[in-house]
Image (cartoon, rainbow, N blue to C red):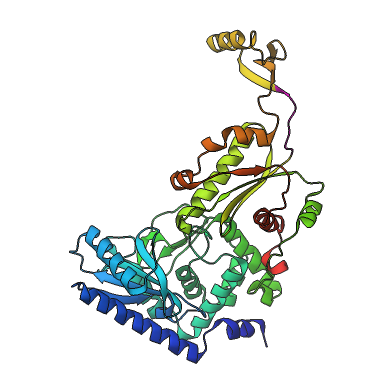
């Protein structure tokens, strides 16, 4: 059996599974209709997403939109739509560009999304009003024989870790995968083309030319030329896809779709891996009760700000990493050295700048932190000064509560525990195992 045939046998729903999925979607539609009617609301349920387009994998999400009359006030749409969603499937409110309810219904994941019923995507009043037009576009333009090619592409993206436009992944959305197959005419043709892709390239369908976008990749939305379907795609995930396409087109393998998991190492194995490398600093804190679309951007912001604070203290940060576990958040910093000499060269103003030179000399001629008299080098005043922090861990300990992690994480960060060696802590060992295993997913 060829690789792609084997993949489809694993990821494509059987006819029996499909019948069950379609039945659940129909019952979900009936549930929201009954719930809306009980509340006296005139809404139109509309199934969108991969189930509606017949591009779904096994274990899909059921994405149900509640379409309201455009005359309904935005506040009412959100309040009533979310109330219908909570009553229909339970779940929890999420918020990306627009609030919605995420939960489960009859054993499958389900999203209930309030939106406006419009007749043209240019009339959109909320960020999600165009989504039904996405569904109709794919249904009208994706040839039936290409549906399995979409499934292959989604499984490929999942396997390499680049599937999903959420804040955690920053990868390829399902809709983007569908458009790529429509644009290139198949899974293999897409990968052959992707071998030569470059950052910043632009893709379109038909004559729908739109405005210029910044980002790793631009794919003009065929139903809204002012939107980039690939706006969430990070530069790293685009590069990962290009690299994967190059290897796969040379030699296909199941590991691109079903990679081996990262093995969690024990403390002895991790210390052996780190021998001869830089120094590791780890920070752990309780994981707050935040949805992923809020948690991950703020965790990554905290990671960047911790690294910048170390760099301002003249520590060389070779790399950094953040990892969210069930109960903990872990931030990893790998430094060239965790300690610095007690003395540092401090550069002052150019000598011809009179007022600044005067201030510099007045400060450093009498400073207890001056380890030399001010001197001239390359036309500027300099002084050998005592370094305030020679230890990276001490620098962070003195400032960690003031390092910005974003408003929600600042408010919920809890106690931060830091280590400048590898502790025998399961959370940190798991994070370090992910950080240290830099193999491509298909090479594990």
159 lies left or right of 216: right
Give the residue displayed 35% in from the left and 77% down from the top: 47
| Total count of labels | 0
Report if residue 343 lies within the magenta region.
yes
62 lies left or right of 121: right
* Closer to the camera in the image, 325 or 275: 325
- Residue 241: x and y in percent read 60, 64
Which stretch appears magenta?
337-344
- Residue 149: x and y in percent read 54, 79
Q: Quadrant of residue 76 in the image?
A: bottom left
Principal SS element in the magenta part? Answer: loop
Can residue 352 be seen by looking at this rendering? no
Can residue 164 be seen by looking at this rendering? yes
Q: Quadrant of residue 391 in the image?
A: top right
Quadrant location of the C terminus in the rendered image: bottom right
- Give the vertical position of 281 relative to 149 (above or below): above
- Give the vertical position of 97 relative to 36 (above or below): above
* Closer to the camera in the image, 399 or 296: 399
* Closer to the camera in the image, 178 or 368: 368
């Amino acid at each position: 059996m060829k690789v792609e045939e084997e993949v489809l046998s694993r990821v494509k729903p059987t006819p029996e599974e499909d019948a069950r999925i379609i039945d659940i979607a129909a019952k979900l539609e009936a549930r929201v209709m009954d719930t809306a009617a009980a509340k006296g609301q005139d809404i139109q349920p509309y199934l969108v997403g991969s189930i509606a387009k017949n591009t779904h994998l096994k274990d899909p999400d059921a994405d149900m939109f509640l379409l309201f009359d455009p005359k309904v006030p935005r506040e009412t749409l959100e309040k009533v739509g979310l109330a219908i969603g909570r009553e229909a499937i339970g779940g929890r409110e999420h918020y990306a560009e627009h609030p919605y309810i995420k939960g489960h219904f009859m054993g499958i994941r389900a999203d209930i999304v309030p939106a406006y019923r419009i007749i043209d995507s240019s009339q959109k009043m909320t960020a999600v009003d165009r989504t039904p037009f996405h569904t109709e576009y794919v249904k009208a333009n994706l040839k039936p024989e290409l549906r399995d090619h979409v499934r292959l592409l989604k499984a490929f993206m999942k396997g390499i870790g680049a599937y999903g436009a959420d804040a955690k992944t920053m990868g390829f959305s399902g809709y983007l995968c569908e458009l790529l197959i429509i644009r290139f005419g198949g899974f293999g043709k897409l990968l052959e083309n992707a071998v030569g892709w470059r950052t910043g390239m632009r893709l379109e369908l038909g004559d729908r030319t739109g405005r210029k976008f910044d980002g790793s990749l631009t794919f003009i939305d065929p139903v809204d030329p002012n939107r980039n379907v690939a706006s969430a795609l990070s530069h790293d995930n685009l590069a990962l896809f290009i690299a994967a396409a190059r290897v796969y087109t040379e030699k296909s393998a199941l590991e691109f779709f079903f990679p081996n998991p990262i093995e969690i190492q024990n403390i002895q194995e991790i210390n052996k891996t780190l021998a001869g490398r830089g120094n590791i600093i780890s920070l752990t804190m309780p994981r707050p009760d935040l949805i992923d679309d809020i948690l991950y951007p703020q965790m990554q912001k905290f990671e960047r700000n911790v690294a910048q604070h170390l760099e301002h203290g003249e520590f060389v940060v070779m790399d950094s990493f953040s990892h969210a576990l069930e109960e903990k958040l872990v931030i990893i910093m790998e430094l060239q050295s965790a300690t610095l000499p007690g003395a540092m060269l401090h550069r002052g103003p150019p000598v011809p700048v009179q007022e600044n030179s005067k201030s510099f000399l007045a400060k450093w001629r009498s400073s207890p932190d001056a380890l030399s008299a001010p001197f001239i080098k390359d036309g500027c005043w300099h002084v050998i000064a005592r370094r305030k922090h020679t230890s990276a861990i001490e620098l962070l300990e003195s400032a960690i509560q003031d390092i910005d992690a974003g408003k929600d994480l600042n408010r919920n960060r809890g106690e931060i525990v830091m280590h400048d060696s590898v502790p025998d802590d399961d959370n940190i060992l798991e994070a370090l195992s992910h950080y240290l295993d830099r193999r491509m997913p298909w090479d594990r």
